[in-house]
Image (tube, rainbow, N blue to C red):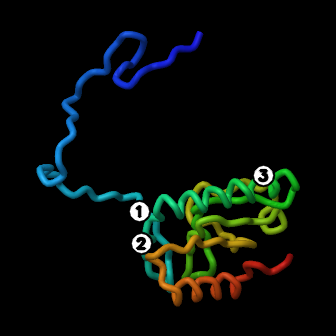
């Protein structure tokens, strides 16, 4: 039997506990800044650089691309598609493409993916979703670096 819960109910007829949450105008909220340790980063020329978060629009676009590319890549036996995985481009550079394709030729299907960063692989295809915070010269330099490292090169 399924049931439909209305907002404020935890189960049929039981109210959620009131934890004192109220709509308070922003100007009256006194909150200390929070430091978030899990920031996205890249390593460029040996220096750790924080990667700005994507907006909802860019995140949705990256998700659509990954959902579009992933199934045929896996089902066709071509490779895998990953999102926001940090990859080592060379000894001084680690990038975190928004979406990346790695062929089974570069990383065999049965070879386990690493569970630590960075992934020691240059992706066959690296997709960077451009937003207002990106500078054209930086994006072009990154694209050039991907190609120089072997992205887009056939086996």
- Which structural element holds mark 3? helix
Say which residue appears at 27% left-offset and 21% top-offset: 17
Q: Is residue 1 left or right of residue 102?
A: left
Q: In this view, does 136 lie to the left or right of 47?
A: right
Quick check: 15 above or below 24? above
- Residue 106 x/y as whole percent: 79, 68
Mark linked to residue 71:
3
Say which residue appears at 67% left-offset and 72% top-offset: 126
- Residue 81 x/y as whole percent: 71, 59
Count the marks: 3
- Residue bearing mark 1: 39
- Residue 8 x/y as whole percent: 34, 23
Quick check: 112 above or below 137? above
Q: Which of marks 2 and 3 is nearer the N terminus?
A: 2
Q: Which of 128 and 87 is in front in this view?
A: 128
- Characterize the local packing of mark 3: few (<14), some (14-19) or many (20 or more) Cα atoms within 10 angstroms: some
Residue 97, by quadrant, is bottom right
Residues under numbered marks 1 and 2 in contact, where contact means CB atoms less than 8 Å apart: yes
Disc 1 and disc 2: Cα gap in Å?
Answer: 7 Å
- Characterize the local packing of mark 2: few (<14), some (14-19) or many (20 or more) Cα atoms within 10 angstroms: few
Disc 2 and disc 3: Cα gap in Å?
Answer: 31 Å
Q: In this view, does 54 lie to the left or right of 139?
A: left
- Characterize the local packing of mark 1: few (<14), some (14-19) or many (20 or more) Cα atoms within 10 angstroms: few
């Amino acid at each position: 039997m399924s049931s439909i819960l209305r907002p404020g109910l935890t189960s049929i007829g039981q109210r959620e506990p009131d934890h004192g949450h109220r709509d308070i105008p922003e100007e009256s909220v006194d909150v200390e800044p929070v430091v978030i340790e899990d920031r996205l980063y890249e390593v460029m020329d040996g220096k750790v650089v924080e990667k700005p978060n994507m907006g909802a629009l860019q995140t949705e676009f990256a998700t659509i691309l990954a959902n579009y590319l992933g199934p045929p890549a896996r089902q066709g036996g071509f490779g895998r598609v990953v999102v926001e995985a940090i990859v080592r481009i060379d000894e001084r550079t680690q990038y975190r493409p928004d979406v990346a394709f790695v062929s089974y030729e570069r990383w065999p299907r049965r070879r386990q993916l690493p569970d630590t960063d960075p992934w020691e692989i240059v992706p066959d295809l690296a997709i960077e979703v451009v937003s207002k915070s990106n500078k054209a010269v930086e994006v072009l330099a990154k694209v050039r670096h991907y190609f120089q490292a072997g992205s887009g090169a056939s086996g």
